[in-house]
Amino acid sequence: MNTCDKRSAKSILATEYPAFDFHEPFEEEDTLWVPDYREREPEMIVRLNLALKKIFDAEWDKSLCEHVFIEPMSKDLQCDKIYQLLPTREQ
């Protein structure tokens, strides 16, 4: 299995992105990566949908909302699925 699907350790990410707030339970090692199994698209969609739900259901300071931008950054397939899950202006 390709290790490109495995995320970097939390300590490495914290060094590269010091302003990022790692909420618990963000483990040091990637606990979702398994060397002999690759996540299928339906599983990815469920996981990404749960992550987006957490983001959009969070309590936001309403005075900052017009200045908040969320930029999904990931691999092509994951970004494609995220954009499919996000509401559009027409919705």
Image (spheres, rainbow, N blue to C red):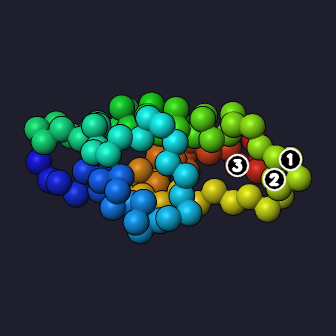
- Whether residue 67 is situated above or below residue 52 in the rendered picture: below
The three-letter amino acid code for the residue at tag 1 is Lys
Residue 76 appears in the rendering: no
Indicate the quadrant where residue 59 lies. Answer: top right
Q: x, y (%) of residue 27?
A: 35, 40
In the image, residue 21 above or below residue 73: above
User: Which of these two is toward me, 30 or 78?
Assistant: 30
Apparent side of residue 7 relative to residue 19 in the rendered image (left or right): left
- The type of residue carrying mark 2 is Cys
Foreground mark, 1 or 3, reads: 1
Q: Residue at x 48, y 37 (%)?
A: 24
Marks 1 and 2: CB-CB under 8 Å?
yes
Of mark 1 and mark 3, the one earlier in the sequence is: 1
Rendered position, 13 above or below 5: below
Label 1: how many Cα within 10 Å (few below 14, some 14–19, many 20+): few
Please give the residue where the numbered disc 2 appears in the rendered image. 65
Q: CA distance from mark 2 to mark 3?
A: 17 Å
Query: Residue 53, relative to residue 84: is it above or below?
Result: above
Q: Residue at x 41, y 50 (%)?
A: 78
Q: Secondary structure at mark 2?
A: helix
The residue shown at (56%, 63%) is 19
Query: Is residue 61 toward the left or the right of residue 8 in the image?
Result: right
* Residue at the disc numbered 3: 88
- Measured as percent of width and height from the top left, residue 8 is found at 29, 56
Estimate how packed mark 2 is, as few (under 14), some (14 to 19) or many (20 or more) residues with alpha carbons within 10 Å.
Answer: few
* Camera-nearest residue between 40 and 34: 34
Q: CA distance from mark 1 to mark 3?
A: 20 Å
Pointer 1 residue: 62
Residue at the (36%, 32%) spot, across then down:
43
Q: Position of residue 36 (x, y in %)?
A: 11, 38
The reply, left or right, for residue 45 in relation to residue 83 is: left
